Image: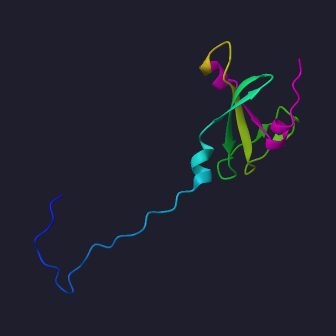
Amino acid sequence: MPRSNRPNRPGSPRPKWTAPAEIDLERARAGIPLHESAPDGEWSVRRITERNAAKTYTCPGCNSSIVPGLAHLVVWREDSFFGHEAALADRRHWHVRCWQTRSFRY
């Protein structure tokens, strides 16, 4: 954009520049699934924050409820035999502690 040749006069309105808003990194990372490798397969794990937890789910690790407003994880297989769409449809909501301490049954 070309510069203006008009001189700056006292009392003339100047554009007010503001600093950009600070980025909330936790909110930005919440929607990005992380990749985890475990003895039971390859997994995508996405964090759900307290703000985004709006429904009640049953945790497959402890069979208790995950109530609205509780941070938790959404987990689905990356190496599903039936494809990516089937893996997404079969995703499960886990308590963070239940996912971290799950046992690998064979």
Q: Quadrant of the C terminus?
A: top right
- Which quadrant would residue 97 be assigned to in this image? top right
Q: Position of residue 34 (x, y in %)?
A: 65, 36
Relative height, residue 56 to residue 27 (above, below): above
Q: Residue at x 64, y 19 (%)?
A: 86
Residue lying at the far bottom of the rendered structure: 10
Q: Quadrant of the N terminus?
A: bottom left
Q: Position of residue 87 (x, y in %)?
A: 66, 22
The number of numbered discs placed on residues in the rendered structure image is 0
Q: Is residue 15 left or right of residue 73?
A: left
Residue lying at the far top of the rendered structure: 81
Q: Is residue 102 visible?
A: yes
95 or 44: which is nearer to us? Answer: 44
68 or 3: which is nearer to us? Answer: 3
Asked if residue 89 lies in the magenta stretch, the reply is yes
- Which quadrant would residue 33 be assigned to in this image? top right
Q: Is residue 15 left or right of residue 49?
A: left
Question: Which span is picked out in magenta?
Answer: 86-106
Asked if residue 34 lies in the magenta stretch, the reply is no
Q: Is residue 40 left or right of residue 6?
A: right
Q: Residue at x 87, y 25 (%)?
A: 104
Q: Residue at x 53, y 57 (%)?
A: 23
Relative height, residue 73 to residue 79 (above, below): below
